Image: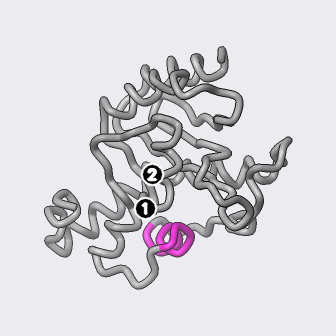
């Protein structure tokens, strides 16, 4: 619990929106349970949280922080169910995948969208691993951290495309 409390304290001191991602063990387990939560905020650090040892109420402080600002997710329809299962319910959401779709981008996966809008390639070789295996491997953790690390910048790039195409209001409505 001290690690989660420390992460929440740092995130609370951060500014701007919070980027979040979740890694379920889809394809390996029947549930949508999150086996890793990645959270990143400007001046609040990047945190990898193993949700398995925690109780639902332990996530209340993180949920409060998420509800205090915009939350950035890529492919929210995939991540929100497993986040809600542990009590994380963001209220203001910016989905970079949905934004990319509405902006008319040809490819809206995190890797292709990042490459097209930010100019660098994400390694996606661990996207289909079994996240329920413990201990989590170091290269998996690096992969997971990079996924959430790009979301703040990607959000701004997607928003710029939406503004350019006069479709920002569409995303806000969704």
Question: Dot 1, how many residues are within 10 Å of its Cα: few (below 14), some (14-19), or many (20+)?
Answer: few
Q: Quadrant of the N terminus?
A: top right
Real-space Cα separation, disc 2 to disc 1, in angstroms:
6 Å
Residue closest to the eye, 3 or 100 = 3
Q: Residue furthest front?
A: 30
Scheme by which the image is coloured: one colour
Q: Position of residue 124 (x, y in %)?
A: 68, 67
Question: Dot 2, how many residues are within 10 Å of its Cα: few (below 14), some (14-19), or many (20+)?
Answer: some
Q: Position of residue 20 (x, y in %)?
A: 49, 45
Contact, mark 2 vs mark 1 (Cβ under 8 Å) = yes
The residue labelled by disc 2 is: 80
Q: Residue furthest bottom?
A: 106
Q: Secondary structure at mark 1?
A: helix
Query: Which residue is found at the position 69% from the left and 35% from the top?
Result: 52
Looking at the image, residue 122 lies above or below residue 172: below
Residue closest to the eye, 113 or 137 = 137
The chief SS type of the magenta part is: helix
Asked which quadrant contains residue 162, the reply is bottom left
Q: Secondary structure at mark 2?
A: helix
Asked which quadrant contains residue 101, the reply is bottom left
- Picture disc at residue 77: 1
Looking at the image, residue 68 lies above or below residue 77: above
- Picture disc at residue 17: none
Q: Position of residue 174 (x, y in %)?
A: 22, 61
Task: State the extent of the magenta-drawn residues as a range.
Answer: 109-117
């Amino acid at each position: 619990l001290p690690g989660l409390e420390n992460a929440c304290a740092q995130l609370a001191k951060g500014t701007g929106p919070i980027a979040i991602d979740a890694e379920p063990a889809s394809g390996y387990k029947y549930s949508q349970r999150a086996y890793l939560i990645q959270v990143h905020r400007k001046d609040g650090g990047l945190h990898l949280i193993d949700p398995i040892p925690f109780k639902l109420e332990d996530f209340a402080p993180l949920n409060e922080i998420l509800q205090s600002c915009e939350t950035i997710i890529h492919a929210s329809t995939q991540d929100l169910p497993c986040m809600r299962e542990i009590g994380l319910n963001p209220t203001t959401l910016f989905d970079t995948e949905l934004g990319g779709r509405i902006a008319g981008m040809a490819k809206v996966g995190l890797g292709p969208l990042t490459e097209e809008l930010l100019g660098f390639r994400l390694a996606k070789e661990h996207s289909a691993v079994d996240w329920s295996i413990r201990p989590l491997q170091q290269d998996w953790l690096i992969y997971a951290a990079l996924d959430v690390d790009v979301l703040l910048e990607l959000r701004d790039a997607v928003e710029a495309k939406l503004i350019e195409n006069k479709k920002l209001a569409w995303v806000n409505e969704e």
